[in-house]
Image (cartoon, rainbow, N blue to C red):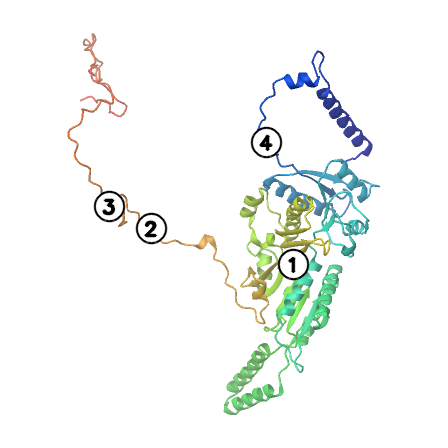
Amino acid sequence: MPFSRRNLVVCLSILALGSLSARSALSAPQSGTETTPAATAARPQPAAAPAAKPAKKRLTFALLMPSDDSPFVSAARIVSNGLTAASRQAANPADILMIEAQPGTTIEDQLHAAVVSGADAAIGPVERDAVEKLAQAESLPLPVVALNAAANADKAPANLVMLSISTEAEAEWIARLAISALPPASFDKPNRIAIITGTSAWEERIRAAYERELQKGLTDYEIVTLDPEKLDELQKQFEPVLTDEQNRELAEAAREAMQKATTDAQKKRAERDANNARRTMIATAEPPYQAALLALSAEEAGLVRNRLPIRMRVWATSATNPGDPATSSTAKTLAYDLNNLVFSESPIVVRYDPTSFEARFSTAMPYSPAAKRLFALGVDAYAIAEQWSQRRSFIEHNGETGELRLTRSTGAEISRTPLTVTIQGGNLLEIAPATAAQPELPTVTAPPDPSTLTFAPVNEMSHDVRRESVRGVVIEDQGAGPAPTPMLPKKAAVPARPAAHAPAAPGVPLVDPSTELHAADPLPTAH
């Protein structure tokens, strides 16, 4: 939308002058009216009306939108959909103003426009570079809820808070959870974690976030870069190594089986059984790495998961979410490939189907998980802006992006605890973090499908009360009462009519006119 600061200031000045003239007219004495103190005292005073409860002020939020040619405009529009949906569902809806960036304007110009428009708080921007500029400012003219994170959040101005759904923050959180799930380590048997990553920019950022937390936790780790053409080498790298005792046990069993075999078929069967026993022992042996942190897409993770040991715990962020298995056959296949994966996610992605989403937000559900997260960011930004516009320095909110917590005295970034989700049996299941933090992931029971629920039939007993506390009441006979008043007047007699002057035509019966015919009565038939 084009913005002219001069025109907007002029309009506000005219409104201010008009308000001032109206107040002057109301306060000026009317002609012919005595205004002396004595006359005022002699005039009778009306009774004081009870004080009315002040109405709650309607808030106004300014959403800072990027320009139309920005690569972030699509994401910002989805955020605006969530923001307006939250306002519609709120007990006290707010006015939402969208201030679009124009060529040549800066983020400071957008904030000035928000102030002049009377906004109580500004929401946005979504671009990280713009949020970095806000974090470096000395002060801001109004409370701002930025929709991304900045590196120097500790030095942010007092009016700024930052709400983010970045996968880097999720990676740090999931890495801490993976560390807490490691089994007890010893000097000769330390715990090791493998970071399996791709080569794209976003995968490198997630990998770096994993590294930061593992270094803080003093956990040994190794970085493995995925090459889709060398998956067999990847499998050998993570394959458990049998001990000398286990190798001797397998060799002794194979030798005994071969000695008992007398025919070629029996020898082939004994050799096949020995190989199967070795593979089974390798699959159930202690893996060289206790856990793997994936910085991969769902498709890449599906290629890797089946080549990792069964006892190896596998963790990831929402970037590895395969999608909704109930609505996509591709997501269903990936969900089976990613069995026992634990990843972080926004609650809005896994808690709603299209029907419940529309019932909750009165709008259609976004199709992709990424669009759902952006929608949830707008919903939670509205809840945070409601409180931050009132200068509340401590905020807690259980939102659609996760559990949010702000202590402004310790930093400007709002901490977000995402949902913990595991994949079992082709289903995405929400679990508690304490359950996921166990050394061995337990089997999680999926909730029943409502469409398959059956209920026991209920035998209805009409006019039958089966309660011992209900007793019959006997009413004494009061004798014959007065005759009841007739509800309908008596039927009037139909006067007799003379016989017809002409006989009926042949084959047509005569009908007595004194006989009433009703719609339900059959017509007489000729004999």
Look at the picture and state if 339 lies above or below 380.
below
State the separation of the CA atoms marked 2 and 4.
54 Å
Query: Sequence-wise, which precedes: disc 2 or disc 3?
Result: 2
**Disc 1 residue type (three-letter):** Ser
Q: Nearer the viewer, residue 95 or 357?
A: 95
Label 2, label 3: how many angstroms apart (C-alpha)? Answer: 25 Å
Distance between mark 1 and mark 2 Cα atoms? 45 Å
**Residue type, label 4:** Ala
Furthest residue in direction bottom, as rendered = 259
Q: CA distance from mark 4 to mark 3?
A: 54 Å
Q: Which is more N-terminal, label 2 or label 1?
A: 1
Q: Which mark is residue 52?
A: 4
Residue situated in front as seen by the camera: 47 or 56:
47
Rendering coords of residue 55 (x, y %):
61, 34
Q: Which mark is residue 471?
A: 3
Q: Residues within 10 Å of mark 4 (few under 14, many from 20)?
A: few
Query: Can you tell which mark lies on residue 458?
Result: 2
